[in-house]
Image (spheres, rainbow, N blue to C red):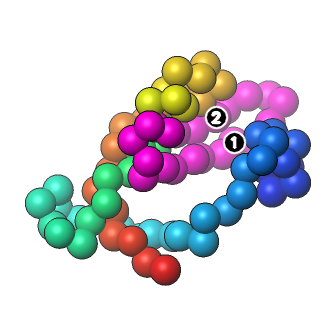
Amino acid sequence: MLDAGIIVPGWQRTGYNFTGALPPDDPRGLFACRFSVRRASVPHSHFFTIDHAECDKVKANPFWTYEGSRSIRKHR
């Protein structure tokens, strides 16, 4: 539903993925906000963003629950 644009029109995959956490001072790390959604009408899902403006925007959306931030390693 997300890939099809049903849940968030215009949403698209970035092609980025990540694994594991790095120490906050690691120069290879990125700061990612983590969100989840748990509603009867949609499957349980998580959303991550490294864009600070997008993080603030999603925090203001009551559909998503902010779960904190993580230091991550970027892979391409």
Rendered location of residue 18, percent (x, y)? 45, 69
Which residue lies under the disc numbered 1?
A: 44
Q: Is residue 36 magenta?
A: yes
The three-letter code of the residue at mark 1 reads: His
Is residue 50 placed above or below 69 in the rendered structure? Answer: below
Front residue of this view, candidates 44 and 27: 27
Front residue of this view, candidates 20 and 2: 2
Q: Residue drawn 17% across and 61% down? A: 23
Q: Residue drawn 32% across and 53% down? A: 31
Disc sitting over residue 37 in the figure: 2
Q: Residue drawn 48% across and 49% down? A: 49
Q: Viewed as shown, does residue 15 lie left or right of 4?
A: left
Instruction: Quadrant for residue 12, please give it.
Output: bottom right
Q: Residues within 10 Å of mark 2 (few under 14, many from 20)?
A: some
Front residue of this view, candidates 22 and 44: 22
Instruction: Quadrant for residue 74, please give it.
Output: bottom left
Q: How many marks?
A: 2
Is residue 60 placed above or below 29 in the rendered structure? Answer: above
Q: Viewed as shown, does residue 9 lie left or right of 51?
A: right
The three-letter code of the residue at mark 2 reads: Val
- Looking at the rendering, the stretch of residues picked out in magenta corresponds to 35-55
Q: Is residue 54 magenta?
A: yes
Is residue 64 placed above or below 7 in the rendered structure? Answer: above
Type of secondary structure dominating the magenta stretch:
strand
Q: SS class of the residue under badge 1? A: strand
Disc sitting over residue 16 in the figure: none
